[in-house]
Image (cartoon, rainbow, N blue to C red):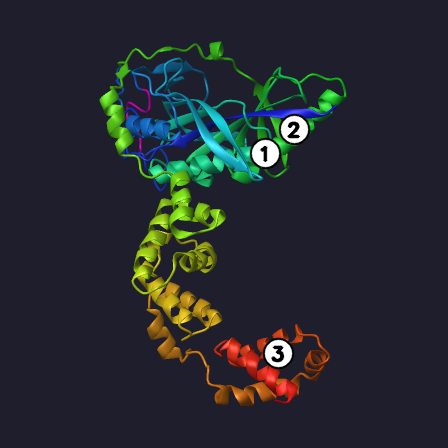
Amino acid sequence: MEYEAIIGMEVHVQLRTASKMFCGCAADYAAAPPNTHVCPVCLGMPGVLPVINRQAVEYALMTALALNCEIPEYAKFDRKNYPYPDLVKGYQISQYDLPFSRNGWVAIEVDGRAKRVRVRRAHLEEDTGKLTHVGDASLIDFNRSGVPLLEIVSEPDMRSGLEAWAYLTKLRTILRCLGVSTGNMEEGAMRCEVNISLRPVGSTALGTYVEVKNLNSFRAVRQAIEYEIARQSTILERGGEIEKVTMGWDEAAGRTVLQRSKEEAQDYRYFPEPDLPPVFVSREWVSELRSRLPELPDAKQERFVASFGLRAYDAALLAEDRDIAAYFEAAVEAGQAVGVDARGISNWITSELFRLLKESGTSITEIKVSPAALVGLLCLVNKGAITQATGKEVLAEMFQTGQLAEAIVAAKGLSQIADADELSSIVDRVIAANPKPVSEYRDGKDPAVRFLIGQVMRETRGKANPQVVEALLRAKIRGE
């Protein structure tokens, strides 16, 4: 029997506030020694009272608006009770039946097909501590406890690991655009749990779902979904039943492993948080937050295509990160004054500059090549002062030193050789040293000339004008 996967996701996003959700402890704990960003409130001491972090609420509402959610006028916090070692109070302050938002959607595209993934709700809660297992013991660091978390819960609208990957990618893009979270899964700033069930193709009933935790990368999400689909399919084909359980993802083994039976909502014994007042969200507040939303990635991508004539794929790459988008637009503005077009700028950013960023692990905001300096390099390439290959070499030098292109070209003597008399002797040497491709060209195999051009470019360290070289090669081989 053929089965269809039904996939929903719960994504936990750490918000980039200065302080924790309900106390004044610094929320940036990454470089701090264990248990140093703590206080009586986030340690759950008797007699302390939580205070709501307004910035976290605003970030939650802005994210909800970006996810096309409805914002109710009234929300409240609840106690979610469960006895985990990393939950110092024995309960988590979260939201249950009256969250800050509901009924939204996220647009994704997979294999050229667009669809919407519905968002059930996006609610605020506090993070837990972090357990580190050492042999038979477990160490607890409460620095993370109380950091604001936004939990984004989707409807079960995804059907494959690829769709789940596209959904996660789009969420992270939106979060980064808003500036509310880094979305870095490897740092724990974005964590997700996947709910997967199978049903016969054509059926509308939902099967028993399995929750998969410990997914700390986009790759792990896709792999876990693919593995779990195969595992559940095998059980069903053998006439077995799927148990409603929580599984963990074992990255090293590439498989899901049983953790525990799945809790239901009643197991958490939700009740309204008695130490926090309800939150009333005025329509004026919502309007003010909506006015603060930046241009979102989908809209930016459409504008880049319409205004600059970019390919949709390139526009999506540039619009994905707000700092990269800002760099591109600054370069386009600088290019307009000197005749460097937006498509050329896009090509250099998405190829050579992206490569340098990846190799160095540097962000676009930290690089030494300003948008205007990149345009200056492109001017030299476009007017033929240097070749494309030399331009790549110069960009790498600019990236390392921060020098301008013209200074590097002058200091290293990288100007393009376009003089036919200067190139003539080099072309003669290449023809003499490569009789086979010369013979092939004379026999009508035109691609052989590309090899010879490459040999001349190597001799001149990429400085020769390719068009002049090609004309010289063809004329000399033909005896003209």
Taking the view exactly as shown, the residue that stands out farthest to the right is 238
Marks 1 and 2: in contact by CB < 8 Å? Answer: yes
Q: Of marks 2 and 3, which one's residue comes earlier in the chain?
A: 2
Q: Residue at x 59, y 34 (%)?
A: 161
Instruction: Please state which amino acid type lies under the numbered disc 1.
Output: Gly
What's the magenta region?
A: 37-44
From the viewer's perspective, tell me whether residue 277 is left or right of residue 440: left
Hey, which quadrant is residue 174 in on the image? top left
Q: Secondary structure at mark 2?
A: helix
Residue contact between numbered discs 3 and 1, judged by CB atoms under 8 Å: no
Q: Which residue is mark 3?
A: 452
Which of discs 3 and 1 lies nearer the camera? The answer is: 3
Which of the pair 292/196 is nearer the observer?
292
Q: Is residue 299 above or below residue 358?
A: above
Res. 384 image quadrant: bottom left
Q: Dot 1: what SS?
A: helix
Residue 371: image location, x then y, percent:
33, 59
- Distance, label 2 to label 1, CA atoms, is 9 Å
What crowding class fits label 1: few (fewer than 14 Cα within 10 Å), some (14-19), or many (20 or more)?
Answer: many
- Residue 480 in picture, x, y percent from top left: 61, 89
Instruction: Tell me if residue 262 is in the magenta stretch.
Output: no
Callout 2 amino acid: Ile
First in sequence: mark 3 vs mark 1: 1
Reading the image, the residue beneath label 2 is 229
Q: Position of residue 247 (x, y in %)?
A: 59, 25
Question: Label 1, on which residue?
Answer: 161
Q: Is residue 361 left or right of residue 74?
A: right
Q: Secondary structure at mark 3?
A: helix
